[in-house]
Amino acid sequence: MKSAADLLTVVEMTRSIPCAPALLPKLLKLAEGGASDLGEMEMLIHLDTGLATDVLRTANSAYFSSNQRCENISDAILRLGSKVLYRIAASTLTGRWLVNPVRGYGWEPGDLCRHSLCVAICAETFAQKLQLADASTAYTAGLIHDLGKFALAYANFTALDEIANRVPDEFPTWREAEKVILGFESTQVTKALLENWGFPSLFLAVGEFYQNPSDCPSTERPTVTLIHAAKHLATQLGYGVGVDGFYYEPDEPALAEAGFKDEDMDAAIPEILSTIQKYISPTGQIRFA
Amino acid sequence: MVLSFHPVAEQMPTIIVGVAEFKISTEPFTYIATHALGSCLGVTFHDERRRIGGLLHAMLPTSHVHAGQKIREAMFLDTGISRALASLLKAGARKSDIRCKVFGGAQLMLTDNYFRIGSKNIDAFYKISQEMELDVVAWEVSGRVNRTIRLNNSTGDVIVKIPSKPEFVR
């Protein structure tokens, strides 16, 4: 299996997965807008029953609830605010997609979802500290950065087992093994999926280049490097990291160019961890309140 | 060591330790577990005579960079290990009977300047364990694997799970 046709097959197979995160680009745009967009946001949330349920449940949770119950999406939106709402929507839509049982990366159910959430939180924190990207954009980019891997695993390619068996003895990195054994990289799959779903070009660049930001066009490189840094830091934190996790090379020149310093990243960990622990319980359950 | 089925062990309750937490148990028939260590270190403490055990999941080597700030002691090895020992002794354990095992500290591909938490943690633990004269009987550290561990408080055995591999005991 070493052709572009296989890549297309993977993308086609994942079209049938229910509730793909295709609503996200629209929601992101609305979340960046003001109160005038809340009506449209309500309409979008109503398109997805599961999402509407999650929004109402969160609005009525102990964390957000006042004395009065929220009985409709409109009230829930006002109570939660667009930022929290977007966070719930993004995680619900991608999370549902990422929790199916899959093979190939040694993931337990939900692992990719946990890991992606950690990357998103690291990216959001770095975006605020280094001003390399808008925080909501960075958060979304973190959530979707590795969708291609999920698509590959969902397609149930036995070649993934071969990769796992041949790294590191024959191939020092997972990426090199993918190139030889699959004939393409999971990043190409991510890019193709995001393209199909109509994500903006910045997200396509994240999907395609987050493993090697130095190769990314300069206009998108700051955000892509941000996700690269967030990915590696989240890997060290361990949440949802599969068998491939530690077999990727950090791109030191890109990190240095973007202004990342090791000591600054280490110093940000307590804050990042506090945020992560708001959303992921010690047993690995994802929660919003 | 290969795992074998044991009906009592199968039914033992499990206490879960999160990142930057330390938990202790004086109940012999209990597991104390922590998930996905990554580059963090999981340090188990066990007094076999009294069957008192504890597990620390520390993320970073030293609290010094956060001097003057409110910190979570168990997040750092320097403060976390002191806190763990104090709790164990308070619960009735004796330092001379406590055996430690250390896990985690996974490392990314080699870099000169970035993402070296795993190796920093291992170095820090080695130094602290020497200074505090800890009896460290097992090191399952470094490498490029994400470890989940479970301390059997009855025996002091630690069951290690790595993605795509069978469990083993240290």
Image (cartoon, rainbow, N blue to C red):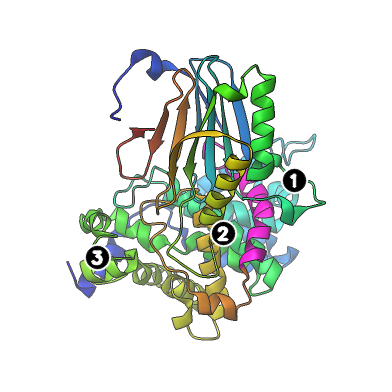
The foreground one among A218 and A49 is A218
Instruction: Label 3, secondary structure: give it.
Output: helix
Rendered image quadrant of residue A265: bottom right
Residue that appears at 66% across and 62% down: A125
Q: Is residue A160 left or right of residue B64?
A: left
Residue B72: % across, % down: 71, 42
Residue A282: assigned label: none
Residue type beneath disc 3: Thr
Dominant SS type (magenta) = helix
| Of callouts 3 and 2, the N-terminal one | 3
Question: How busy is the neighbourhood of tag 3: few (under 14 within 10 Å), some, or many (20 plus)?
Answer: few
State the residue position of label 2: A120
Residue A204 sits above or below residue A93 on the image: below
Residue B36 visible to the viewer: no
Residue type beneath disc 2: Ala
Which range of residues does the magenta coloring cover?
A262-289
Extreme residue toward the bottom, this view: A218
Q: Quadrant of the N terminus of chain A?
A: bottom left
Whether the residues at callouts 3 and 2 have beta carbons within 8 Å, the answer is no
Spatial separation of the CA atoms under disc 3 and disc 2:
28 Å
Residue B71: assigned label: 1
State the residue position of label 3: A9
